[in-house]
Every structure is written in structure tokens, then in C-alpha cells.
Image (spheres, rainbow, N blue to C red):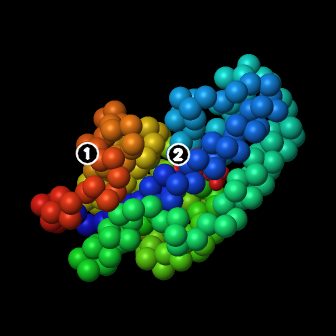
Amino acid sequence: MKAFIFDLDGIIVDTAKYHFKSWKIISKNFGFELSKNQNELLKGVSREKSLDRILSWGGISIDRFEKKKYLEKKNELYKGFISNLSQMDILPGVNKLLDFATIKDIPIALGSASKNAHQILEKLRIKNKFKVIIDGNLTSKSKPHPEVFLKGAKMLGVNPKEVIVFEDSIAGVKAANQAKMVSVAICKCGKIENAKYNFISLDDIPLEFFEKMI
Ligand code: B16
Ligand code: MG
């Protein structure tokens, strides 16, 4: 394997729960309760696309000015929830993999839909580990479109087929597969459909798993 691309929310840090909390509040404003199952379909999806999905689930139609207002409100709520993030919030197994990649000279990229990615990596104090950071500000097509990962591979100068992508979302696994990369899904649910490999936690991946591929 020539490179690793990490998703952010749900892989490096459990910010997925804060996106859910924020969208739940916004959905309540529209008069409905956002379910856990619906939230799964928002993971890895851009802020704008997420709002569009919520509006369609609620059967609500608003103009673009209102949309902008709710997008800002959602981000304000979210930023409030993540204000105290620190190194302590890095998920189990992340540092082990980052260290392994450094020792083995495997370049690392971030492939996230989030426009808050830089701030989050700074709070976690691991931004310097990433050779390339592709976030929601550098992409125009939301996962499941492979743009975010293909851009990452291009900037790292590696062939997509030689990239392992770590993802926690249905949309992200689809994006990695469409990019012809090796998708490794991390989900407490046990399995994300069509992922090449599935693990419950990054910490469960034995390093020999990678030794076989590099
Ligand atoms: P923001 P990932 C995604 O991050 C989240 O999974 C998704 O729930 C969120 O809507 C999206 O980022 C945009 O985030 O509002 O911070 O720009 O999983 O691709 O790292
Ligand atoms: Mg994610």
C-alpha cells in the first residue's frame, strides 16, 4: 500500500455525535424528530446536502436565504459542542496507525466532508501528521462522490488502487469504492455494506493486516 486516507468525523474523533445533536435541534425547529437511522444517512455528507435531506424527510420547503440561516445555526451549535475537543478525544487506534504509517513511510491524507477539519485537527494536535488535507472547502461534490479521495491521492502522488481509506459512513465507503481504493469500514454496527474490510474499531486492526499489503 502506498498511502492511507483517513476520514475525520467518526474515524479520528467521535464528532459524529455532535453533528447528530446539532441536526436534531435544527430538525426540532422544523417540527420533527431526527432518527438514528436517518442520521446514518447524513454521515460523510456535506452540511448543505444534509440540510436538503432533512428538509425532504420533513416535507419542508424553504428558500435559499432561510437555508443559509439554518446552515449557519447548525454550524454554530456544532462549533459550540466541539469547543473543548482535545488530544484526549482522539479515538482508540488512531495514534497507533499514524505512528505505523510514519515508521513505514506511508504518506497520510485526510479526506473529510467537513469544513471544520483544520480546526479539529489543530485541537487534537495531530495536524502535522497529515501530508495532505482535503476537506469540505476543497471539494464541490459530497461523498458518495469519490472527489475527496481522488483529490487526496492526486495530491499525494499515488495511484488510487494503492490507497487504503478508513471510513465510518455508508456514503464514505461508497466514495472509496468508486475511487477504486481499498475501503476499510469502522463501525460499531459490525458491518458497512460493500466495504472491502470491516472492523469495530481502528484499534482492532492488527498491524499485520497492513504488512500483507505493503
Ligand atoms: P461540517 P467526515 C462529515 O465529515 C460528517 O460526517 C458529516 O456528518 C458532516 O455533515 C460533514 O462532515 C460536513 O461537516 O458541517 O463540519 O462542514 O465524516 O467526512 O469527516
Ligand atoms: Mg465520517
Image check: 85 left or right of 81? left
Secondary structure under tag 2 reads loop
Whether the residue under disc 2 has CB within 8 Å of ligand 1:
yes
Q: Which residue is mark 2?
A: 44
Image check: 101 left or right of 135? left
- The residue located at (35%, 63%) in the rendering is 93
Q: Position of residue 43 (x, y in %)?
A: 53, 42
Q: Is residue 73 above or below residue 191?
A: below
Secondary structure under tag 1 reads strand
Q: Position of residue 163 (x, y in %)?
A: 30, 59
Residues at marks 1 and 2 touching, judged by CB atoms closer than 8 Å: no
Q: Position of residue 188 (x, y in %)?
A: 39, 42
Quadrant placement of the C terminus: bottom left
The circle drawn on residue 46 is: none
Along the line of sight, which residue is nearer the eye, 138 or 30?
Answer: 30
Q: Is residue 183 above or below residue 133?
A: above
Q: Which residue is mark 1?
A: 197
Along the line of sight, which residue is nearer the eye, 133 or 42?
Answer: 42
- The residue located at (44%, 38%) in the rendering is 170
Residue 54 visible here: yes
Quadrant in the rendering for residue 130: bottom left
**Dot 1, how many residues are within 10 Å of its Cα: few (below 14), some (14-19), or many (20+)?**
some
Quadrant in the rendering for residue 81: bottom right
Q: Amino acid at mark 1?
A: Tyr
Mark 1 to mark 2: distance in Å?
18 Å
Residue located farthest toward the front when viewing the structure as drawn: 88
